[in-house]
Image: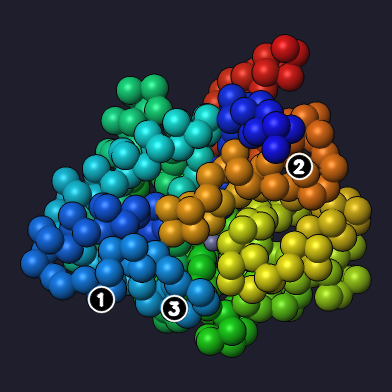
Amino acid sequence: MRLVQDLETTLRVLPKVELHVHLEGSFTAGRIVELARAAGEPLPEAPDRLLAVGSLPALLARLDWWCGLVRSAEQAEAQAHDFAGALAADGVAYAEVIVNPTHWSGLPRPVLLEAVSAGFGRAAAEGHADCWLLVSLLRSQTEDGALEVVRELERRPPERLVGLSIDGNEAETGPTGGRFAPAFGLAGALGLGRVAHAGESSGPEGVVSALDDLGVSRVDHGIRIVEDDGVLRRVADQGVTLDVCLSSNLALVHPDLELHPIRRLVDAGVAVTINTDDPATLGVTLTGELALATRHLGWGRAGAVAAVARAIDASFASGATRAALRSGLAAYAAV
Ligand SMILES: [Zn+2]
């Protein structure tokens, strides 16, 4: 027990980087109750059951409800700001936070994205985690709808925008192939980073499509590439980073850590980062996830530092920000 506590204490002060986390999964039960009261909406469950969602479809449905309770720019700004504060309290130095406007039915898309960006900016100025925005498409959107999102980002870029993402339930939508290629192509032309959820609810073919059709440099989850040796080798050889979320997988798709693909991914030389996915919903922190991975893989402190270094390398941060993060990491490692 003492050893476990010591590892978590050590990792809490490690200046961490989070690349796969959804603002939609940052709502605490207390915040949801407050927002429901302000919106005059009844709770579908007792407050202590609001976050208890045991499957990906159930989670996505519940996210739609609580994000839809956000009805003002001030509320969205506060959610972003307070989340950056929670990340700072866990020792997160930098985060790229996914926001999928399709979940936030109570606000027009540009209003939402500018409010979130403003909340992140205010938090950063106060010394909280340095949070940046990944605007995410939904797998079930149309090709034109997706392209319009990126055109709007071109016309009216939120200040803290760093990339384009795509998420949603691929098991439900089936392979989307090149449907999102035009949107991702434009994002690339605009100099935005590109990342996609794949290889969680889809198999290895979802990861191949993300690489070939969308031109991503990172894949969120991606764990099912272990089902195809060729894809596993390709991802390792090309240096594609997989943003893995252990507790999320354990809760939604892979109940047994011993059978989780992360060990095979690491052994195959894949660049793996450790992330939370939906921290408030799952009741996890990045410190806890890094501790879980460190214990499971026998990494030790140096292995945990190396995982954060990989996250810095794979981030869409500016050169100056990356240099600052690297020197913070080096200072931690030197003690
Ligand atoms: Zn995710």
Q: Return the mark for residue 294.
A: 2
- Residue flagged by tag 2: what amino acid is it? Thr
Q: Check disc 3: other Cα within 10 Å, few if <14, some if 14-19, many if 20+.
A: few
Q: List x then y, in percent, for residue 238.
A: 82, 54
Question: Which tag, 3 or 2, sits closer to the chain's start?
Answer: 3
Residue found at x 10% / y 58%: 38
| Residue to which mark 1 is pinned | 44
- Determine whether label 3 and label 1 are within 8 Å by CB: no
Label 1 element class: loop
Q: List x then y, in percent, for residue 144.
A: 40, 77
| Residue to which mark 3 is pinned | 58
Q: Check disc 2: other Cα within 10 Å, few if <14, some if 14-19, many if 20+.
A: many
Q: Between label 3 and label 1, give the one nearer the viewer.
A: 1
Residue found at x 38% / y 77%: 61
Please state which of residues 56 and 149 is positioned toward the viewer in this rendering: 56
Most extreme residue toward the front is 1
Question: Which tag, 3 or 1, sits closer to the chain's start?
Answer: 1
Please state which of residues 73 and 110 is positioned toward the viewer in this rendering: 73
Can you tell which quarter of the image residue 118 is in?
top left
Label 2 element class: helix
- Determine whether label 2 and label 1 are within 8 Å by CB: no
